Image: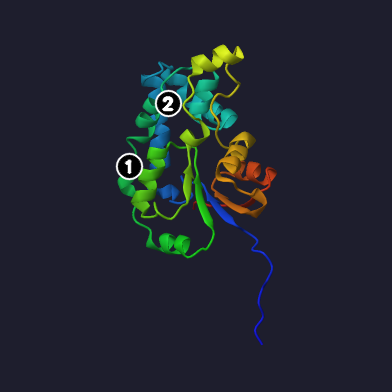
Amino acid sequence: MEFVNSSPPRYECLLFDLDDTLYPLSSGLSDACSNNIIEYMVEKLGIDEDGVVELNQILYKKYGTSMAGLKAVGYEFDNDEYHRYVHGRLPYENLKPDPVLRSLLLGLPLRKLVFSNGDEVHVMKALTRLGIEDCFERIISFETLNPDINEAELSCVTGHLPENPVICKPTEIAFEKAFDIAQLNPHKTLFFDDSTRNIQTGKAVGLHTVLVRNN
């Protein structure tokens, strides 16, 4: 006798963070990114070198990313220039094709998306180096969450800049915007991330979650 499972699938979509989730922390990209951010703050924004590391940590913890924090406290700079400086010099050569991950992703009959605070150029470079760039339905990146809006125009319309002019994880608005853009049902989505605070927000907005450990 053959039994057929007629119940609907528990998950419809897999939502993946990129950095230190789809590739290991040991790649060195995260450390290089942190160093590039510190250098940008000193060289491009004129922040005192003695206190820059502590300031960067404070901004990251409070606002989600260093970039979001810098914008929120009043520093003005071009988003693309920042991303080129911070991500453009990363050691992408450390990322190697991952045929096991590729096979696993292609074998899962579910929607698959990448949800990253990084810019799209960075995300595509990393996915391409891993050999999994064609495994995902779409990428939700910095540009997706933050369409090109002139900050001066926004200030004129609203009378002020919002408390955090950059939308990014771990804020709930970033998740809600991602759900709307990709037409995701969070209750039918499994979210993978290496960040505890991103996982906490994910749970708060209804996602099923997997905390990725980097040992």
Give the quadrant of the N terminus: bottom right
Expressed as whole percent of the image width and height from the top left, the position of residue 199 reads: 61, 45
Name the amino acid type tagged 1.
Pro
Quadrant of the image occupied by residue 181: top right
Labelled disc at residue 91: 1
Q: Residues within 10 Å of mark 1 (few under 14, many from 20)?
A: some
Earlier-in-chain disc, 2 versus 1: 2
Q: Is residue 14 above or below residue 116?
A: below
Expressed as whole percent of the image width and height from the top left, the position of residue 11 reads: 62, 58
Q: CA distance from mark 2 to mark 1?
A: 21 Å
The answer to which of 185 and 16 lies nearer the viewer is: 185
Mark 2 residue element: helix
The residue sitting at 51% across, 21% down in the picture is 71
The answer to which of 108 and 58 lies nearer the viewer is: 108
The answer to which of 187 and 25 lies nearer the viewer is: 187
Mark 1 residue element: loop
The answer to which of 153 and 209 lies nearer the viewer is: 153
Residue 188 in sight from this viewpoint: yes
Name the amino acid type tagged 2.
Asn
The residue sitting at 43% across, 17% down in the picture is 47
The residue sitting at 67% across, 46% down in the picture is 203
Q: Which residue in the structure is indicated by mark 2? A: 79
Expressed as whole percent of the image width and height from the top left, the position of residue 169 reads: 56, 37
